[in-house]
Image (spheres, rainbow, N blue to C red):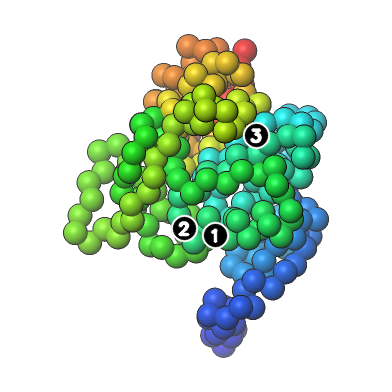
Amino acid sequence: MRDLVQKTAATILRLTGLQYFPVRVRRGFPAGARWTLFPWSAYWRGGYEPAMAQAIDSLGNLRGKSCWDLGAHFGYYSVGLALRTGPEGQVVAIEPLPANFARMERHRRMNRLTWLKAYQCAASDTAGVADFFSSLEAGDTTVHLAYDGEVKTAATPTIPVQLICLDDLVARGEIRPPDFVKIDVEGHGHHAVGGAIESIKRSRPVILMGFHSPQEVAGTEALLRPLGYRFSPVGNKDPADRIGADYLLRPA
């Protein structure tokens, strides 16, 4: 009976404007920010990914800094970072899924974060257009660009997404080189790093990255180990088991 009530309530919220009812984030990384009621209520009720939040806060004062959020989803970390950098800083949020991007933009406007620059695209090592494996559902966190070697079938739902190289945005003066980068892009992280490698060489940011495939791990190491980056697990993780884990990548 309880499950039926919860499913019915979720359906009502999803199909009506009640999902956009404004609430305050009670605790967690963007504590105090204005948010929307549904979905992913864990974002505003608190307790979402505490080890990640602790890892970012361990970096110290981010006031005035430049932060990038690759795989921004609803803007949980983008909003929290913007609150920490303040208007003298800059936050760049990258999110390709239209439904997620629209919700992130709503949260940005609700909190009047004019220094948060949001881009509806995916970060990669080449510019262009690619198929995004997507269910088109708001809040879906398993959507992704093709893993290395993954083949699209006739049954695979996809949408075209724009690919950008972050180095190009820096070169054009659209965004600042980063002091901190969060990357959680479902197996495409090494390509995102490759498209930002000149900016990384220049500013040597701390990187917080979630790994989702062996190719993502190996590709990232090949790019960053020669630059002196050290990999440290976030939370109580086995350092040898990187798939499905988050890591802090620090320059020497």
Tell me: 221 left or right of 23: left
Q: How far apart are marks 2 and 3 (CA)?
A: 22 Å
Which residue in the structure is indicated by mark 2? 98
Q: Is residue 181 visible?
A: no
Residue appearing at x 30%, y 37% in the figure? 148
Mark 2 neighbour density, 10 Å: few (under 14) some (14–19) many (20 or more): some
Q: Which element is circle 3 on?
A: strand
Picture quadrant where residue 97 is located = bottom left
Residue 29 placement (x, y as % from top left): 73, 48
- Quadrant assignment for the C terminus: top right
At x 67% / y 31%, what residue is drawn? Answer: 66
Give the percent coordinates (x, y) of residue 152.
23, 50
In the displayed orientation, state which residue is furthest to the front. 172
**Viewer-nearest residue: 92 or 205:** 92
Instruction: Name the residue carrying label 1.
Output: 102
How far from the left and from the top, in percent, is residue 73? Answer: 54, 52
Which of the two labelled residues, at mark 2 and mark 3, occupies the earlier sequence position?
3
Mark 1–mark 3 distance (CA, rounded to whole Å): 20 Å
Whole-percent x, y for residue 249 in the image:
58, 25
